[in-house]
Image (cartoon, coloured by chain):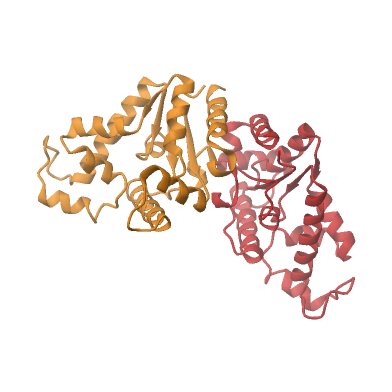
Chain colours: A red, B orange
Amino acid sequence: MKKIITISRQFGSGGRTIGKALAEKLGYKCYDTELVNMVAKETGFDPSFIADVGEYAPGKSILSYAFTSAFPHGAPRHMNASDYLWSTQCKMINEIADEGNCVIVGRCADYILKDRDDCLNVFIYADDEFRAHRIVELYGEREASPEKRIEDKDARRKVNYKYFTGRNWGEMSNYHICLDSSAIGHDECVEIIADIAKK
Amino acid sequence: MKKIITISRQFGSGGRTIGKALAEKLGYKCYDTELVNMVAKETGFDPSFIADVGEYAPGKSILSYAFTSAFPHGAPRHMNASDYLWSTQCKMINEIADEGNCVIVGRCADYILKDRDDCLNVFIYADDEFRAHRIVELYGEREASPEKRIEDKDARRKVNYKYFTGRNWGEMSNYHICLDSSAIGHDECVEIIADIAKK
């Protein structure tokens, strides 16, 4: 029985939707934007800034923040903003995991909880056409093409994950199961993950 | 319903065992060493040479073969041994796929059949400790350490796959589902793949 499930996902693959449906099926709590709000409350940073830190590479937007913005709730002097957020995020994800019966979407939770044996790490991906179609349907048209938006978002997640974990985002060895949601279908992905979690 | 399943696998992960059990469960035919023998019969090459070509990088062992050995059954003059074997292997894997109800282990079948929509591509991997333990149990001790044997074998598969397909071996986007057999268990892997194949 796995009482913690982490879902990492490509942009537009439906990983978030799968996470929510999975939590509902198992009677688990799903942490996605909830986690952003919790970290915001703990650190005093704005939720939109915290959401961005999960997507952008530190050194671009975040480090500049470290020099222009004070630490709202007083981080130690030797920490910059991204370290402070990371350490708070690690603490909160570990607390959530200790409570158990949870699905955590994104936020490097697979890495943060890698030493627990009650945690199932899942990666959801999909083919480019499926993702391009899905993000336009969900988030509407933008100036950039859907292909460019996907490329940018995944590149940010990749750099961010590398910076904080030292590992390669989307490398299968970091996860216990990786599913192509465009080939397998969202409902079937939920079924498969739930079945494994129950065993 | 997927009538063709390809299994690619890390050395020692149990992909071959899973493939055989899966074929039995679904009433499919499993092609592993059978395929090597079929290609041997068609080309006239020795089965052990063909098995090697699936593991080694052309340019090392195979190209030298091209200059020292005649083509037993008369390949066109502009082809070298590895091209000849590859083209025969592609032809036979396509024939097997056309017959359907089959599990094909290794031999770049995921790539060769990539344009079919009745084919499910699976990758089986496992953690290093599990694999090291398993290869010693299955194949016995050797002079090289199990870790070194695993590293060498996977490196060969990687170079070979890249040479023939231009793609990266073990990159999840090449497969529909990737399973860590050491975390999930062989029997559960068989169940999951069979369930997807039936839908």
Q: Is residue B47 above or below residue A82?
A: above
Image vertical order of residue A170 relative to residue A134, above or below: below
Q: Is residue B167 left or right of residue A52?
A: left
- The x, y position of residue A180, in whole percent, is 57, 38
Q: Quadrant of the C terminus of chain A?
A: top right
* Residue name at image x 47 percent, y 27 percent: B22
Residue at 47 percent of width and 43 percent of height: B13
On-image quarter of the N terminus of chain A? top right
Left or right of B67, for residue A138: right
Q: Is residue B11 visible?
A: no
Q: Residue at x 41, y 53 (%)?
A: B150
From the viewer's perspective, is residue A55 above or below residue B7? below
Task: Evaluate whether residue A122 shows in this view.
Answer: yes
Q: Position of residue A111 (x, y in %)?
A: 66, 56
Give me the residue at 76% from left, 61% from top: A90
**Observer-nearest residue: B140 or B6?**
B140
Asked if B41 appears above or below A121 in the picture, the reply is above
* Residue situated in front as seen by the camera: B147 or B169: B147
Tell me where residue B42 sits by quadrant.
Answer: top left
Instruction: Indicate left or right for B147 with A157 as reference.
Output: left
Q: Nearer the viewer, residue A77 or A149?
A: A77
Give the quadrant of residue A39. Answer: bottom right
What number of labels is visible?
0
Q: Position of residue B43 (x, y in %)?
A: 18, 34
Residue B71: % across, % down:
12, 41
> What is the quadrant of residue A177 in the picture?
top right
Residue occupying the far bottom of the picture: A77
